[in-house]
Image: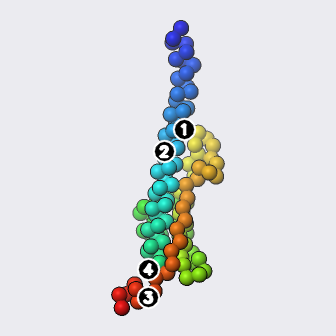
Amino acid sequence: MVTAEFAVLMPVIVVVLAAVLAAITCVVDHVRCVDAARAGARAASRGDDPAVVRAIGAGLAPAGARIEVASAGDGAVVVRVSAPDRPVLGVLTDALRPRAEATMPLEPASAVTGG
């Protein structure tokens, strides 16, 4: 009798475990996106080239992440990082797509050069 209940319950346990592991992966990707956006924004605020900013972000972001560097318009720079799509149990919702954005003011040239 116990074997029948276990056989019915086992697929449910596997699905729940897969969902938990997918959620953990999503959280880790989100944290990596936040770190990449912050580091990229710091580099961009110093006046680094956008290619350098993307390289710094790519080193911290999840593999295949998209990194955008743009001017915020009011003397600031914004860096957006979005991780690639990873469906959870065959379903991808917008809420499960890891992404982050960081905005920092541009540093004055004298502060960057030390003069």
Q: CA distance from mark 4 to mark 1?
A: 41 Å
Q: Position of residue 69 (x, y in %)?
A: 54, 72
How many numbered discs?
Answer: 4
Q: Which mark is residue 59?
A: none
- Gap between marks 3 and 4 measured at Cα: 8 Å
Of 88 and 16, nearer the camera is 16
What amino acid does circle 4 point to?
Answer: Arg
What's the amino acid at mark 2? Ile
Determine the residue positioned at 52% across, 28% down: 13
Q: Earlier in the sequence, mark 3 or mark 4?
A: 4
Identified by mark 1, the residue type is Ala
Crowd rating for badge 4 (residues with CA inside 10 Å; few <14, some 14–19, many 20+): some
Q: Marks 3 and 2, Cα distance to the nearest angstrom?
A: 42 Å
Q: Which residue is painted at 62% across and 47% down in the image?
A: 92
Question: Is residue 72 something one can see in this rendering?
Answer: yes
- Labels 4 & 1 near each other (Cβ < 8 A): no
Mark 2 element type: helix
The residue carrying mark 4 is: 46
Quarter of the rendering containing residue 75:
bottom right
Q: Position of residue 60 (x, y in %)?
A: 42, 61
Question: Pointer 3: what residue?
Answer: 109
Side of 107 where 16 appears, left or right? right
Choose the circle earlier in sequence order: 4 or 1: 1
In the rendered image, which residue does mark 2 sit on?
Answer: 24
The image quadrant where one finds the C terminus is bottom left
Q: Which residue is mark 1?
A: 19
Whichever of callouts 2 and 1 sits on the residue coming sooner in the sequence is: 1
Mark closest to the chain's N terminus, 1 or 3: 1
| Residue 115 horizontal side relative to residue 104, left or right | left
Q: Position of residue 9 (x, y in %)?
A: 55, 21
Residue drawn at x 47%, y 78% as measured from the top left: 45
Disc 1 vs disc 3: which is toward the camera?
3
